Image (tube, helix red, strand yellow):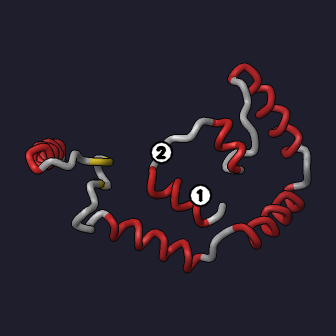
């Protein structure tokens, strides 16, 4: 995904229909509900018929070139967790998004406190 699309996706926090997700390359394919079980069963049986060591070797090679480094993963996690404490953040890791008005934020905090163990 290029920079422009990554910014659009990350900043809009929009939902995307399956066809668009397929076009963007986020999913391998879209499948009608009625065809999903048969497709998954066929694919799972085919993969299960292969030698386990061969499957592991293929996955290792694919991961080698497509997975972020452990350092990058940790950095992303740290930024994400820190972002909940930013003054402009309206997110709560326990409750999702909270309303932006002061009165509704107070109500949301009170509600969260009453649910705390």
Q: Where does the image place residue 104, in percent across and percent down from the top left?
A: 13, 43
> Whole-percent x and y of residue 96?
32, 48
The earlier-in-sequence mark between 1 and 2 is: 1
Residue, disc 1: 5
Indicate left or right for 96 with 49 as reference: left
* Residue 88, label in figure: none
**Residue located at (11% from left, 50% from top):** 102
Q: Secondary structure at mark 2?
A: loop
Choose between 7 and 61: the one closer to the eye: 7
Q: Is residue 16 left or right of residue 23?
A: left
Identify the image quadrant of residue 53. bottom right
Which residue does the numbered mark 2 point to in the structure image?
Answer: 14
Picture coordinates of residue 35, whole percent (x, y): 76, 23
Specify the quadrant that holds the N terminus: bottom right
Dividing the picture into quadrants, the one containing residue 63 is bottom right
Residue found 29% across the figure and 51% down from its top: 94
In the image, what residue occupies the spot 91% across and 50% down? 50
Question: Marks 1/2: CA distance?
Answer: 12 Å
Q: Nearer the viewer, residue 28 or 50?
A: 28
The residue nearer to you, when weighing 90 against 64, is 90
Circles 1 and 2, Cβ within 8 Å, touching? The answer is: no
Q: How many marks?
A: 2
In the displayed structure, 35 sits above or below 3; it is: above
Residue at the far front in the pictured view: 4
Image location (x, y in percent) of residue 92: 28, 54
Name the quadrant containing residue 33: top right
| Element class at badge 1 | helix
Kindly identify the residue that appears in the image at 33 percent across and 70 percent down.
82
Q: Is residue 73 above or below residue 108?
A: below
């Amino acid at each position: 995904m290029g920079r422009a699309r990554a910014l659009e996706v990350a900043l809009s926090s929009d939902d995307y229909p399956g066809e668009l997700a397929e076009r963007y390359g986020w999913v391998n394919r879209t499948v009608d509900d009625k065809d999903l079980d048969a497709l998954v069963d066929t694919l799972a049986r085919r993969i299960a018929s292969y030698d386990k060591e061969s499957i592991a070797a293929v996955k290792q090679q694919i991961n080698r070139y497509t997975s972020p480094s452990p350092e990058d993963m940790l950095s992303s996690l740290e930024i994400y967790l820190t972002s909940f404490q930013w003054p402009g953040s309206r997110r709560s890791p326990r409750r999702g998004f909270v309303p932006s008005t002061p009165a509704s934020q107070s109500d949301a905090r009170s509600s969260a406190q009453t649910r705390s163990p």
